[in-house]
Every structure is written in C-alpha cells, then in structure tokens.
Image (tube, rainbow, N blue to C red):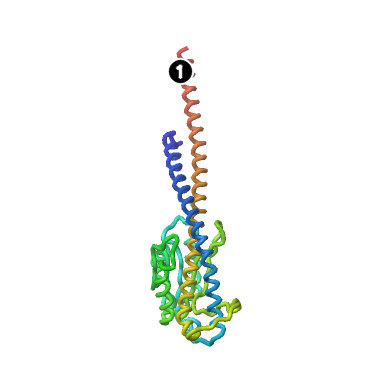
Amino acid sequence: MASLRDIQSKIKSTKKTSQITKAMEMVSAAKLNRADTNAKQFVPYMEKMQEVVGSIAKGVNSRHPMLVTRPVKKTGYIVITSDRGLAGAFNSSVLRSVTNAIKERHQSNDEFAIVVIGRIGRDYFKRLGYPIVEEVLGVPDQPSFEDIQKFANRTIQMYEDGIFDELNLFYNHFISKISQEVTEKKLLPLTDIDTGKATTNYEFEPDEDEILKVLLPQYAESLIYGALLDSKASEHASRMTAMKNATDNANEVIHKYTLHFNRARQAAITQEITEIVGGAAALG
C-alpha cells in the first residue's frame, strides 16, 4: 500500500492538473462564443454571394473552368485541422475520414494531393507519405479573411491551372457545443450551385462572363473561409468538452485518492492505538 505521503503527493498533483484543465475549458468556452458568432455572421454574406453567382450561372452558358466538369486524373483534398491537440476527437475524426476516402478512391499517390490547414494534419500526412502541395500553419483562433485569402487563392489557381481536376473539402461542421460532424464538400468544379434561390433580376456590366471571371474565384475562396470559421467553432467546442471531461476525471481521481488517504490514516491511527494498548498491558 502507498504511504500517506505518496497519496498526498498524488492528490496535490492531480488538483494542479484539474486547475489547468478547468482554466483551459473556460478559455475555450470564451473562444467558442466568438467563433460561433463569426461563423453565423458570415452566413448572410455567403447566401447573398451564392444567390448572385447562381443567378449569373443560370442565365449564361459559360465555359469558365471552374464551372466545367472535366475527366478526373488528379483529385485535390483540402483538409482543415488544428495546430494544437487536446481537442478530443476533433482532429482524428476528420483525418480518419480523409484517409478512408483516399484508400477507397485511389490506387496510388499520383492520383491525389493534399492541401492542408493545421499542423496536426500536416504532420499526419507527412508520416503517411501523402503528397502535400500546399500548407498553412498558425491560423488565428478568430481568423479573418485576409489570414486565409492568399492560401485560398493559390489553391483555386492550382485547379484553374489543371493541377487538380476536382477539389474536395474536409472539415468539422459545428452543430452544437457537444456535437460536431465531419463534412465533405465538393468545392470545384462548381456544379452544384443552387440557382433556384435567385429572387432579384440583375443587370451586368460589362457582361456575365467577365463578371464570372472575378466572382467565381471569390466565391470559391469564400467557401473555404466559411468552412474554416465553421471548423474553428468546432475546434473550440471539442477542446472545451475535452477539458471538461478531463477536469471531471481529475476530480474523480482526487475523490478516490482522498478515500484511500483517509483509510490509510485511519489504519495507521488504529495500529498506533493497538501498539499503545499492547505496551500498557505488557507493563501491567
């Protein structure tokens, strides 16, 4: 049986751990509130952007490369992860989904390439030996569009240059504080734009094709940014839940060690009383 000093040391160290995890839970909760607000505020912009793009795409027969389906020789995967761990299944779930999809769809590494956001994902794919053609690390907890614009622009340009024939996006979709869902979205080509939401008639100058050349890349970049905001909210929610579970587990361990300590101390006191009584009886 461990000594009283050993048990006290374990109780003390576990209490310090619970204080740290509790603080991390509170920090993640504050970050989650901001991230959720950012994601919700971006929705009206995306809906209006989709309406305008859908209205143009519906009315013209454009040959813009972002709207045209071509034979798929190489697939690109944008994968959004975090730079830090301690977030429960946030990273492992999306990485597992991407890995399973790649194994099911491709026979060799020449058929796909990875575009990754986050250090966890970058390190994971490097260990697997998967081809990474673009990466971005150190994205802020509350990212602005400028933080991701250059990365998104380079990725879209790779598609337009023919490096990819299709581009899929994997990320964690935020549902609630305790629920996040891995989501796969076909980013390019833009073949599933909803053209039925357009309720306004637009007049275009100079013409629709020229506007599409500018608007379609911005729309695709916005889809990436919207997924990033969604993923950040999921990350903070997952980390908050993980730290709450860690704090609860630490409190249970503290309770268990406290019971052991009290029993050990009671046994020690009983032993001392027995020895005193025995010594007194021997003297008598």
Residue 121 placement (x, y as % from top left): 43, 65
Instruction: Tell me the residue at 51%/43% (across/down).
Output: 251
Residue 265 placement (x, y as % from top left): 48, 30
Looking at the picture, tell me which residue is in the foreground, 25 or 112: 25
Q: Say left or right for 177 vs 27.
A: right
Can the viewer see residue 70? Answer: no
User: Residue 199 appears at what percent x and percent y?
Assistant: 60, 77
Residue 267 position within the rendered picture, expressed as x and y whole percent measured from the top left: 49, 29
How many numbered circles are shown?
1
The residue nearer to you, when weighing 42 against 135, is 42
The foreground one among 206 and 98 is 206
- Residue 83 can be seen, yes or no: yes
Q: Examine the image and state in which quarter residue 82 appears.
A: bottom left
- Please say if 257 is above or below 122: above
SS at badge 1: helix
Name the residue at the top extreme: 284
Compared with 39, 268 (above or below) is above
Residue tagged 1 = 279
The local crowd at label 1, few if under 14, some if 14 to 19, many if 20 or more residues have their Cα within 10 Å, is: few
Q: Which residue: 50% across, 37% down? A: 258
Label 1 amino acid?
A: Gly
Q: Is residue 171 above or below residue 242?
A: below
Of residue 232 and residue 42, the one placed in the foreground of this image is 42
